[in-house]
Image: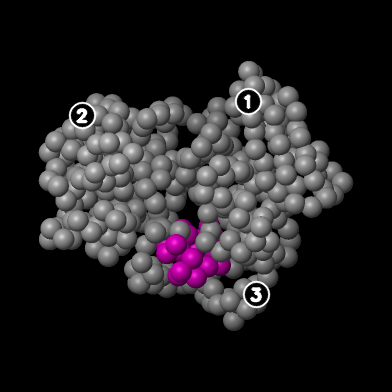
Amino acid sequence: MRPVSRRQVLGSRVRAQQLDRRAGTVADTAVLDQGVQDTGTDGARWALALRGVDPATVGRDELALAWTLRGAPHLYRRADLPAVAAATAPFSEADAGKRIYDAAKPLRAAGISVVDALDRIADRMREIVSAPTVKGEVSARLTAVLEPPYLRDCVPCGAVHPWEMPFRLAALRAGLELEEGTSPPVLRPVDGLVPAGAAPRRFDVVHGSLQLLGPATPQHVAGLLDAPVADVKARWPHDAVEVDVEGERRWLLAEDADRLDDDVPEGVRLLGPYDLFLQGRDRALVVPDAARAKDLWRTLGRPGAVLADSELAGTWRARKAGRQLTVTVQAWQPLPPGLRERIGEQAERLAAFRGLSLRALELVD
């Protein structure tokens, strides 16, 4: 097996995810094939900006937001939604059950397959949502037409409503998208959406995971997709080649092997907390220091990460006051000459993206 260093892995991911490019378009942005998670203030649109997509060049209806992988909202090219609906659907009954967590138990106890349950929920949602409708109203109307195995007693809400993950995973199945920038979420129909019979290779989520976060193992990909390892192995790309990453057997797409070189991609980026670069399931390789990894990937209040020439150099947070933004960077080690200025340039970029001015960059070594 070809030996691959940690440095080569990180550099390969920067190149694959186009974090080293200065300019690009919606059409040629690779991460949009797999969806760009839109969580938090600096979500999908910021992730696209970091990959060179000028927000001013994106057409009003060129992109669409939908609940897909891990039940999270992801941004896609609108024209790709038929393929996305096919690519992100559960691989099997076992996969569907794993994706909806505890909601699978009452369904199976009632003799209802999870795949059939998702179809039934989708059918009801399609009937309910004929125009933009807030999530709470959709949920209430679903509760009135679904049987008990589809519903749960929600202690925090003090009410009965549909289980959350089946609700989310059925939405695109029902031909529904999310309106960007709405909280609580607003669902609306996608005109003429009919899922493709099969997803082309470029939208296949196992293939895409290897392409954008490789080299990886089936376990890494299964963790990213919330899918059973057996289903991932059954869909493993035939052209994946074995490599040795720091003594671990992993796989890489043969077509991507030329990205494995020793040249370090240049560029500083303030990655959002849920940027794809941070979504790989080999966190110990990306951030070997356990304390730093725990802080970066905390469950609540997750910070962003400073990417400097393919290495993570610290975390960042931003706070708004009026029309000004203050960015605070917690550096993991003393910053080399010039890096402080490059981080400052990215802080200015973030402020401008938010339509604000930068008040201050606070660096904590």
- Which badge, 3 or 1, is on the more N-terminal residue? 3
- Residue 115 at what x, y percent from top left? 21, 56
- At mark 1, the secondary structure is strand
Calculate the distance from the C-alpha at mark 2 to the C-alpha at mark 1: 37 Å
- Residue 46 at what x, y percent from top left? 56, 37
Overall secondary structure of the magenta section: helix
What residue is shown with label 1? 320
What residue is shown with label 3? 246
Query: Label 3 neighbourhood size at 10 Å, few (<14), some (14-19), many (20+)?
Result: few
Residue at the extreme bottom: 1
Residue 218 relative to residue 350: left or right: left
Q: Amino acid at mark 3?
A: Glu
Residue 83 relative to residue 293: left or right: left
- At mark 3, the secondary structure is loop
Query: Label 1 neighbourhood size at 10 Å, few (<14), some (14-19), many (20+)?
Result: some
Calculate the distance from the C-alpha at mark 3 to the C-alpha at mark 2: 53 Å
Which residue is at a point 75% across and 51% down the rendered structure image? 332
Tell me if residue 51 is in the magenta stretch.
no
Start and end of the magenta stretch?
206-223
What residue is shown with label 2? 130
Q: Amino acid at mark 1?
A: Lys
- At mark 2, the secondary structure is loop
Residue 183 relative to residue 301: left or right: left
Which residue is at a point 58% across and 55% down the rendered structure image? 16
Residue 185 in sight in this render: yes
- Residue 135 at what x, y percent from top left? 30, 32
Calculate the distance from the C-alpha at mark 3 to the C-alpha at mark 1: 42 Å
Q: Nearer the viewer, mark 3 or mark 1?
A: 1
- Which badge, 3 or 2, is on the more N-terminal residue? 2
